[in-house]
Image (cartoon, coloured by chain):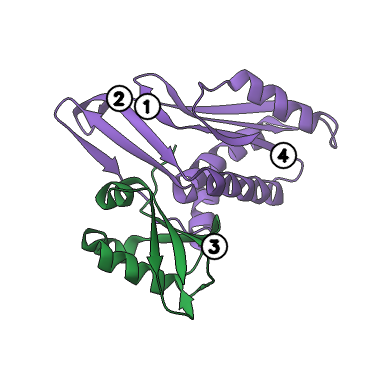
Chain colours: A green, B purple
Amino acid sequence: MRVNVLLFARLRELAGADAVVVEVAEPATVATVWQAVAVATPALAPFDRTLSCAVNANFARMSHPITAGDDVAFLPPVSGG
Amino acid sequence: MLLVTSDPLSVEALTTDVEAQVRTRGEGCGAVASFVGLVRATHGGRAVRYLEYEAYDALAVTVFRQIHAEAQDRWPGAALGIVHRVGRLAIGDASIAIVAATAHRAEAFQVCRYAIERVKQIAPVWKHEFFEDGEAWVEGAVADPTDEAARAHALAIACA
């Protein structure tokens, strides 16, 4: 299935795009989607341990199940304020 | 008022909004405390030319609502406004405005401090600094809104 991936800040810069579409096998979780993203753009792989994730604009764990058409966002460490 | 905007921030509008919310609650509104974060001219000894802020707008608003709910849980009757600016900001520009309204002054300061600490922990907003001699993304906390230790830490700072 196809999943929409949103990337922010340094992840967006490294990928050269703020959104990408990845193809993953079902059943999938956020972790499956991240693996597909990291394979497509190896420069993102080091963010493995410091990622936050969101599904359809709500924070989610790596174990969160994904269905076709979901928006999955990967967030580097934050620095608002 | 809990939002992300590319427009200049207005503390006055935020103050009017939160005061109106508390005016008719319990004892009414007797105190408003505000915090405004500004773009500083230096970072780590380097001269800053300008900053760019980026946010995941939809999620940021959800996080601001969570912070508001947490504040109301700890300080019943309090109202809180949070507006974060995104886009290119010059030295001296306001990047965030937080206004807390409560019945009494001590709580207003506490709510305001709690809110900025929580924003720094969990709001999906990123700062990109542009220096005279380079650029860098600032990467602070790994955002986890369910991390109770982080929340307790923010509460301890607010009530110190």
Q: Type of residue at label 4?
A: Ala
Q: Give the residue at mark 1.
A: B88
Q: Give the residue at mark 4.
A: B78
Does residue B155 lie above or below B79 as drawn? below
Identify the secondary structure beneath mark 2.
Answer: strand
Quarter in which the C terminus of chain A is drawn: top left
Few, some or many residues within 10 Å of mark 1 (<14, 14–19, 20+): some
Few, some or many residues within 10 Å of mark 3 (<14, 14–19, 20+): few
| x 19%, y 29%: residue | B46
> Marks 2 and 1: in contact by CB < 8 Å?
yes
| x 66%, y 26%: residue | B32
Mark nearest the camera among 1 and 2 is: 1
Chain at tag 3:
B
x, y (%) of residue B48?
25, 25
The one of A24 and A79 positioned closer to us in this rendering:
A24
Q: Type of residue at label 3?
A: Thr
Identify the secondary structure beneath mark 1.
Answer: strand
Mark nearest the camera among 3 and 2 is: 2
Q: Type of residue at label 1?
A: Arg
